[in-house]
C-alpha cells in the first residue's frame, strides 16, 4: 500500500476541514465577532492566524485535488492584440482596491474571495541589488541630503498617522478571510473549477505550478490536531499534480 493510500482521501479530509472550521468558530466566535473587535493586539492576531492559516492551507491543497478530478478546460482563444494592450494599460494604471465597509452582524453579505494565488516560480524572481550602500554620518550638509531627510521624516509621520487605521483594516481582512474559507468549505466546486482554469492557462508550466501549490510550506504555528490532515492533504495534492503534467 502506498504512503498516500495510507492517509485519508479527499472526502475524509473535507470532513476534517469542516471539523476544523467548527472548532475555529467555537474558539474565535465567527467572522462577525472578529470584525467587531475594537482593538487588535499582537496576541489576538496570532491566535486568529494559528487557526486560520493552517485551515486555508488545507483547503488550498484539497481544492487542487478536486481540480485534478475535473475534465481539462478548453484552451482559451488568443486575445486580440489591441484588447491585450488595453488590458495591460488598464492594469498598469489601476487604482489600489479599497476595503469595502462591512456589517459585522451580516457576514453573508460581505464581498469576499478566497485567495488561491499560485506560489511564484523561484527562477523568475527579480534579483536584489547586492551592491554596498553608503550611509552619511552626521548632519547632512548638501541640499539634496536635507530634502531626502525631510522626505524620510514625512514618511515616518504618515506611517504613524495610519497605524490605527492599519490595525482596523487588518481586523477586517482577517474576518473576510475567515468568511471566505467558510464559503469554500460549504461549496468547494466553483473554487476548484476556478483553480483548474488557472492551471490550464499555465499550459506546460501547469505541473510545476501545481507542485508549488501542493508543497507550499505550512505555518510555523498551527493547531496540533490539523497536522495529520495537512500531511495527508499534501500527499493527495502531490499525487494529483500528475494530471497537470501534460496540460499543453
Image (cartoon, grey):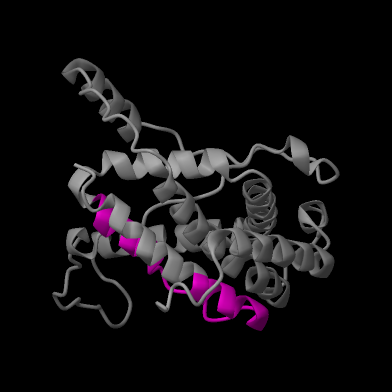
Task: Check the image and report above or below for 110 versus 35.
Answer: above
103 relative to 83, above or below:
below
Q: Give residue 171's quadrant in the image.
A: bottom right
Residue plotted at (81% across, 51% down): 32
Relative side of 167 to 121, left or right: right
For the record, the magenta segment spans: 206-232
- Residue 120 in sight in this render: no
Choose between 137 and 131: the one closer to the eye: 131
Report whether 33 appears left or right of 75: right
Q: How many labels does the image show?
A: 0
Q: Which of 7 and 162 is in front in this view?
A: 7
On the image, the x and y values in percent for residue 220 come to 52, 81
| 93 displayed left or right of 169 | left
Residue 15 percent coordinates (x, y): 68, 61
Relative vertical location of residue 243 with respect to residue 86 in this rendering, above or below: below
Give the x, y percent position of residue 157.
54, 60
Residue situated in front as seen by the camera: 202 or 121: 202
- Magenta portion: prevailing SS class: helix
Q: Where is residue 103 in the image (x, y as percent from the top left)?
A: 80, 40
Identify the image quadrant of the N terminus.
bottom left
**Residue placed furthest toward the left:** 131
Quadrant for the C terminus in the image = top left
**Magenta stretch holds residue 221:** yes
**Residue 112 sits above or below residue 50 on the image:** above
Residue at the spot 30% in from the left edge and 25% down from the top edge: 87
Q: Which residue is drawn at 44% across and 34% down?
A: 95
Query: Residue at coordinates 38% horizontally, 69% vertically from top-left?
Result: 215
Residue 37 can be seen in this image: yes
Amino acid at each position: 500500500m502506498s504512503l498516500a493510500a495510507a492517509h485519508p482521501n479527499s472526502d475524509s479530509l473535507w470532513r476534517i476541514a469542516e471539523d476544523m472550521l467548527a472548532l475555529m468558530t467555537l474558539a474565535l466566535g465567527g467572522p462577525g465577532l472578529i470584525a467587531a473587535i475594537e482593538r487588535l493586539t499582537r496576541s489576538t492576531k496570532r491566535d486568529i492566524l494559528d487557526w486560520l492559516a493552517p485551515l486555508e492551507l488545507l483547503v488550498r491543497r484539497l481544492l487542487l485535488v478536486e481540480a485534478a478530478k475535473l475534465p481539462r478546460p478548453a484552451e482559451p482563444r488568443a486575445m486580440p492584440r489591441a484588447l491585450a494592450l488595453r488590458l495591460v494599460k488598464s492594469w498598469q494604471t489601476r487604482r489600489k482596491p479599497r476595503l469595502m465597509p462591512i456589517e459585522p452582524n451580516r457576514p453573508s453579505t460581505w464581498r469576499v474571495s478566497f485567495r488561491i494565488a499560485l506560489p511564484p516560480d523561484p527562477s523568475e524572481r527579480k534579483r536584489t541589488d547586492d551592491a554596498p550602500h553608503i550611509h552619511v554620518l552626521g548632519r547632512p550638509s548638501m541640499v539634496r541630503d536635507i530634502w531626502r531627510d525631510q522626505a524620510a521624516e514625512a514618511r515616518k509621520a504618515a506611517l504613524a498617522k495610519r497605524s490605527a487605521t492599519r490595525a482596523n483594516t487588518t481586523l477586517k481582512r482577517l474576518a473576510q478571510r475567515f468568511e471566505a474559507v467558510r464559503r469554500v468549505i460549504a461549496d468547494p466546486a466553483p473554487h476548484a473549477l476556478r483553480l483548474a482554469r488557472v492551471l490550464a492557462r499555465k499550459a506546460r508550466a501547469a505541473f510545476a505550478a501545481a507542485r508549488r501549490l501542493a508543497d507550499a510550506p505550512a505555518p510555523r504555528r498551527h493547531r496540533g490536531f490539523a497536522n495529520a490532515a495537512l500531511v495527508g492533504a499534501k500527499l493527495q495534492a502531490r499525487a494529483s499534480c500528475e494530471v497537470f503534467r501534460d496540460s499543453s
